[in-house]
């Protein structure tokens, strides 16, 4: 079983480049301040690294 991480979209993507907006959507966010639990894969971690100013890791989920 893969490790999961909990991430939160906490800052609006208004005024950001379309690629950053698309990354937020690909991570599965639909509303601001939404929290999601996702698998910790290299692809997901790279997406989080691309938009650290919009999302944050809340806590590690077990």
Image: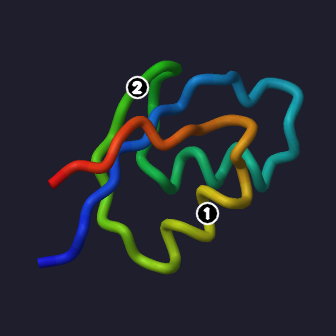
Q: Position of residue 60 (x, y in %)?
A: 31, 49
Q: Position of residue 26 (x, y in %)?
A: 51, 56
- Residue at (49%, 80%) from the top-left corner? 42
Q: Position of residue 17 (x, y in %)?
A: 87, 45
Give whichever of discs 1 and 2 has the lower sequence position.
Answer: 2
Quarter of the view holding residue 16: top right
- Determine which of the numbered discs, if any, sits on residue 32 in the image: none
Mark 2 burial class by Cα count in 10 Å: few <14, some 14-19, many 20+: few
User: Is residue 29 shown left or right of residue 36?
Assistant: right
Mark 1 burial class by Cα count in 10 Å: few <14, some 14-19, many 20+: some
- Residue at (78%, 55%) from the top-left corner? 19
Of 14 and 43, the residue lying toward us: 43
User: Is residue 59 shown left or right of residue 24?
Assistant: left
Q: Secondary structure at mark 1?
A: helix
Residue 62 drawn above or below residue 25: below
Task: Confirm or deny contact between disc 1 and disc 2 (CB under 8 A).
Answer: no
Of 31 and 38, the residue lying toward us: 38
Q: Which residue is mark 1?
A: 47
Q: Which residue is mark 2?
A: 34
Of 28 and 36, the residue lying toward us: 36
Residue 2 drawn above or below residue 48: below
Marks 1 and 2 sit apart, C-alpha to C-alpha, by 17 Å
- What is the quadrant of the C terminus in the image? bottom left
- Residue at (53%, 67%) from the top-left corner? 45
Residue 12 drawn above or below residue 28: above
- What is the quadrant of the N terminus in the image? bottom left
> How many discs appear?
2
Q: Position of residue 39 (x, y in %)?
A: 30, 65
- Residue at (47%, 53%) from the top-left corner? 27
User: Is residue 17 shown left or right of residue 50?
Assistant: right
User: Is residue 22 shown left or right of residue 31?
Assistant: right
Q: Secondary structure at mark 2?
A: loop
């Amino acid at each position: 079983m893969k490790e999961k991480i909990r991430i939160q979209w906490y800052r609006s993507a208004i005024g950001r480049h379309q690629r950053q907006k698309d990354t937020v959507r690909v991570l599965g966010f639909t509303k601001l301040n939404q929290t999601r639990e996702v698998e910790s894969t290299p692809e997901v971690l790279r997406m989080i690294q691309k938009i650290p100013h919009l999302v944050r890791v809340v806590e590690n989920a077990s």
